[in-house]
Image (cartoon, rainbow, N blue to C red):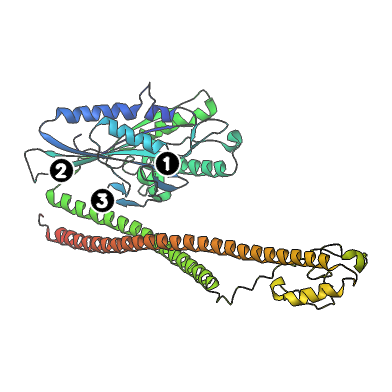
Amino acid sequence: MEGFNATIFAYGQTSSGKTHTILGNETDPGLFQLVSNQLFQHVADQVDKRYLIRCSYIEIYNEKINDLLDKSNQGLTIREDIKGNVLLDAREPVVDNVDKVMENMMQGNKIRRVAATRMNERSSRSHTIFRIILESKDANQKDGPVHISYLNLMDLAGSERVSLTKAAGERLKEGANINKSLSVLGNVIRQLSEGKEFISYRDSKLTRLLSQALGGNAKSLIIGNVTLAAEETRSTPEFAQSTKTVKNKPKVNILSATEEALQGYQNLTRDLETRLKKQAIKLEEMEKSKQEYLLEIERLKTEVSIVGRFQMGASSSTPKKTLRRHTFGDYGNVSPKKASLRYMPLKNYPPKEESSGREMRPIQEETYEEALAEAESVIAEDVPASVLKRQLKELEESFNELREFTKLDNQLEILDLKKQLTEANSKIDRYSQELRQVTDAYNEEIERVQKNSQKAQEFHRLAIQTRFSGKTL
């Protein structure tokens, strides 16, 4: 509360209760909720100071730092501020009560990596750090110094033996990375306790983030969690004992008005750069979507053109549909005289053979006279005229019905094509409207990115001037 950094973390074998110690549950609050309650109670009691409280929640999974409060913000880079504090470009929402802090913690826990192993039904597969950033200043001094401190609540994944977990595949890879980072942590503790000049903080992401808590500018509390398994538990007291010899150098973190302004400009510049990168990705996706719309519109226009030419009778790309043969009977082995008592065919088409070369033509292309002449050539001379007239009338009626049927079939096909044309036009209108919206949004994003880029450059220039001139902004 007075500007000191602090770190609390639990260390121990898997399934020893580290997560429960730090986070607790609904009925049994852990250190996280207890510390948050005390923090906001203290803030409420201080009437002569102003406070700004933010929080962040990250995990270290397979040596990759991910933001648990922003799914899109993965693979974070570690950096340092002007005081040497280790920082991350993670999302830092402002919180003003315990409920909002708990809400952010629960939001992050939903995407935190946990999995079942042979030793733990819900084993943490990543190290997590919930950070509370507290800034305070005198309420009566507008340009007075600012105290800034970081409280880190860490839940370390437990060490585990492959021979006991029988892990394979992804679980094996996770366990190897967990054990590696914990091994590096043990090496750092040993180097600090032996007073080594070089400390290998950079050998893992975990020790890099713990550099201030171990031998740096922070007050640290380490909780050793043990289980009934004596062999696996023995390493925990040994680790805790070695940390007792590590000497930290905690000091109050105070920023002058100039330093605060400079840090604010630097933070804003980094924030704008991050937003620019995200906007660039978004613009690329919008450009891809725009090209897809254009291709779809061109395809629909081509379909509309083909349908239009068909309706006008000018389509050269679509082959003319050959109508089916239509016959009214077949003589077979019946004599011509007996066949006269049947319906006579317009044409008696035999099955087309491979070598015949005869082309089958639509029935409309057969003239009525040709059909009549063929019928007369196979009719016996002694057939009564009344029978011939009746058969002729029936043939005329059948021919007219066939012609009407063909006409209706063409009309149905045209109606179907008209329906397709209407649907295609509707799609073109819809895609054109969406394309206009995408184009407008694309232009707006470009303009916004350009403005943000100009702001970032201006802030960067002011930050550099402030740093070298020593003037208060």
How many numbered dots are placed on residues in this image? 3
Left/right placement of residue 28 relative to residue 329 reads: left
Q: Secondary structure at mark 3?
A: loop
User: Which quarter of the image is occupied by the C terminus?
Assistant: bottom left
N-terminal of the pair, mark 3 or mark 2, is 3
Badge 2, how many Cα within 10 Å: few under 14, some, many 20+? many
Q: Quadrant of residue 434?
A: bottom left
Image mark for residue 146: 2
Mark 3 or mark 1, which has the lower sequence index? 3
- Type of the residue with mark 1: Leu
Please say if the residues under marks 3 and 1 sit with CB atoms less than 8 Å apart: no
Residue 337 image point, x, y percent: 91, 67
Say which label, 1 or 2, has the lower sequence index: 2
Disc 1 vs disc 2: Cβ atoms closer than 8 Å?
Answer: no
Q: Amino acid at mark 3?
A: Asp
Give percent across and percent down for residue 169: 59, 44
Question: Which residue is outermost to the top?
Answer: 27
Residue located beneath label 1 in the image: 185
- Using a 10 Å C-alpha cutoff, classify the residue at mark 1 as few (fewer than 14 neighbours), some (14 to 19) or many (20 or more): many
| SS assignment at label 1 | helix
| Residue 245 at least partly seen | no
Can residue 182 be seen?
A: yes
Dot 3 corresponds to which residue? 81
Q: Position of residue 439 (x, y in %)?
A: 34, 64
Task: Say if 366 sits above or below 220 in the image.
Answer: below
Q: Is residue 287 left or right of residue 99?
A: right
Q: Residue furthest left?
A: 140
Q: Nearer the viewer, residue 420 or 71?
A: 420
* Foreground: disc 1 or disc 2: 2
**In this rendering, is residue 246 above or below 459?**
above
Q: Is residue 22 left or right of residue 409?
A: left
